[in-house]
């Protein structure tokens, strides 16, 4: 069974909506780990729309499991990662006007941008992952860039599942499986995430070689109703 890393970005989204001090991402992280999460994921966006620099520093001091920092492949973000030293850094695409990350990183088309960022992070001892669409050319480019892991973007699968259930999602699930098999053959570790829910997570858990699932919005939404510990526990149960 893969392990669960809980993305707590939207705890910060709720806090930033009023510009107040609560709810605190740090408290949410502690509760998620208490409930069995293997790690905590946060995306420090360039526009700082939710997670702030101070959050990342506090989480680095507090998180007992894995701290996964999602970030753009920019000089500013690489410098921050080198100061904070997360356990893992996941390079993701970033657009100012998007509500959430809309697709995978274009690794195949930007080797001069991605490769140097990967090299600097890995030199500092940070495990480096690239968030990509489940496409063979992107998987191969990630291996060429020197990444340790790829994280497969599961958004297309989640969208198909939402519209028509498991049957409708079969094609997208097979794309994920093919990308997972290729990643394994190239020596890449495998993570996955985006749009995963209590309803659709089961099939993704069976991807070959899968280590971590990064899930945020659905857990945080559930936590608003039942609390973070129960929400995390329910997701782990669905993953088994």
Image (cartoon, helix red, strand yellow):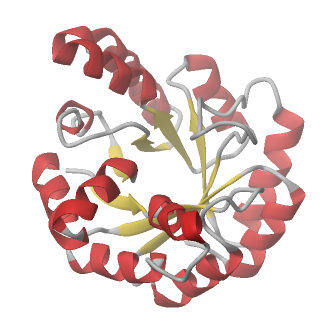
Residue at position x 43%, y 39% in the image: 194
Residue at position x 17%, y 48% in the image: 239
Residue at position x 72%, y 31% in the image: 107
Is residue 36 at all visible to an observer of this figure? no
Q: Position of residue 110 (x, y in %)?
A: 83, 31
Query: Which quadrant of the view contains residue 35?
Result: bottom left
Q: Nearer the viewer, residue 131 or 112?
A: 131
Query: Which quadrant of the view contains residue 174?
Result: top left
Residue at position x 74%, y 50% in the image: 72
Q: Compared with residue 238, is residue 158 higher up or lower down, i.e. above or below?
A: above
Outermost residue on the bottom side: it is: 61
The answer to whether residue 60 is left or right of residue 147 is left
Q: Position of residue 191 (x, y in %)?
A: 43, 45
Q: Position of residue 217 (x, y in %)?
A: 39, 50
Q: Nearer the viewer, residue 161 or 192?
A: 161
The answer to whether residue 101 is left or right of residue 67 is right
Is residue 176 at all visible to an observer of this figure? yes
Q: Compared with residue 93, is residue 156 higher up or lower down, i.e. above or below?
A: above
Q: How many marks?
A: 0
Q: Compared with residue 141, is residue 38 higher up or lower down, i.e. above or below?
A: below
Query: Which quadrant of the view contains residue 224?
Result: bottom left
Q: Position of residue 2 (x, y in %)?
A: 26, 51
The answer to whether residue 233 is left or right of residue 4 is left
Q: Compared with residue 24, is residue 138 higher up or lower down, i.e. above or below?
A: above
């Amino acid at each position: 069974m893969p392990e669960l890393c809980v993305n707590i970005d939207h705890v910060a989204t709720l806090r930033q909506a009023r510009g107040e001090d609560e709810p605190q991402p740090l408290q949410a992280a502690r509760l998620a780990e208490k409930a069995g999460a293997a790690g905590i994921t946060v995306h420090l966006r360039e526009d700082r729309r939710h997670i702030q620099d101070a959050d990342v520093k506090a989480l680095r001091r507090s998180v007992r499991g894995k701290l996964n920092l999602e970030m753009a492949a920019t000089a500013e973000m690489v410098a921050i990662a080198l100061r904070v030293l997360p356990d893992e850094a996941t390079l993701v695409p970033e657009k100012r006007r998007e509500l959430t990350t809309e697709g995978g990183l274009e690794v195949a088309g930007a080797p001069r941008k991605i490769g140097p960022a990967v090299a600097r992070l890995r030199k500092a001892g940070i495990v480096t992952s690239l968030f990509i669409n489940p496409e063979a050319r992107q998987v191969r480019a990630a291996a060429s860039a020197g990444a340790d892991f790829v994280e497969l973007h599961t958004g297309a699968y989640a969208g198909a599942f939402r519209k028509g259930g498991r049957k409708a999602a079969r094609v997208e699930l097979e794309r994920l499986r093919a990308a997972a098999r290729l990643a394994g053959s190239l020596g890449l570790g495998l993570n996955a995430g985006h749009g995963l829910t209590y309803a659709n997570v089961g099939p993704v858990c069976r991807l070959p070689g899968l280590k971590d699932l990064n899930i945020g919005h659905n857990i945080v939404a559930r936590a608003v109703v039942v609390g973070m510990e129960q929400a995390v526990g329910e997701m782990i149960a669905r993953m088994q």
